[in-house]
Image (tube, rainbow, N blue to C red):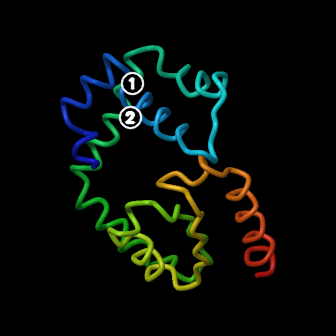
Amino acid sequence: MVGLVGSPLFRFLSYHFNFFLEYTLKHITKRPQQHFSEREKQAYREPNLNRAVRRYSHDLFRSVTKSHDYLADLEQRLRAIKGIPALLIFGDRDGTIKMGWLTRLERIFPRHRSILMKGSHHFPQIYDSAAVAQAIGRFWDEVVTAA
């Protein structure tokens, strides 16, 4: 997916048609639990009205496709902080779970608390921001402040 979003074709579509944002808004707002008002959609669109700005998200995805060494080094460095409590929030429909990302992070951070947000995909905070905020608050109160 990152390779596709980082491709020259995707850059063209995003630059000329704001494709990435419009696709995301269309599919997120189709969900029964998520209804964005036109004002909320406009708040997402506003920063991307200038076409030159649209290249930044593409550049981010393109750079990730070329960052294997950096990401492998980062994973090794994360082991130095493995003792800290970690809150891992994923949507239960997030494709990265099938790719093993949650399990991988759970191994890196043995003092984790994992939360699967029902009905959410890759960005659970968009689907149910109140539940994510509550989970962070509970984690903070129960784990961080108690330490």
Whole-percent x and y of residue 126?
A: 59, 46
Residue sticking out furthest to the front: 32
Judging by the rendered image, the residue that carries numbered circle 1 is 54
Q: Quadrant of residue 41?
A: top right
Q: Looking at this view, is 5 or 128 the one in front?
A: 128
Q: Quick check: marks 2 and 1 in contact, CB under 8 Å?
A: yes
Residue at position x 56%, y 83% from top?
A: 83
Q: Looking at this view, is 51 or 34 the one in front?
A: 34
Q: Residues within 10 Å of mark 1 (few under 14, many from 20)?
A: many
Q: Quadrant of residue 141?
A: bottom right
The total number of labels drawn is 2
Task: Measure how far apart labels 2 and 1 are at the Cα level.
Answer: 6 Å
Q: Quadrant of residue 85?
A: bottom right
Q: Looking at this view, is 24 or 47 the one in front?
A: 24
Judging by the rendered image, the residue that carries numbered circle 2 is 57
From what the image shows, is residue 96 above or below residue 2? below
**70 left or right of 81?**
left
State the mark number for residue 75.
none
Q: Amino acid at mark 2?
A: Ser
* Quadrant of the snapshot with the C terminus: bottom right
From what the image shows, is residue 87 above or below residue 91? below
Residue at position x 37%, y 17% from top?
A: 52
Q: Amino acid at mark 1?
A: Arg
SS for callout 2: helix
Q: Looking at this view, is 52 or 28 the one in front?
A: 28
Whole-percent x and y of residue 2?
A: 28, 48
Residue at position x 76%, y 61% from top?
A: 134
From what the image shows, is residue 79 above or below residue 94? below
Residue sticking out furthest to the left: 8
Residue at position x 63%, y 33% from top?
A: 36
Whole-percent x and y of residue 113?
A: 61, 77
**55 left or right of 26?**
left
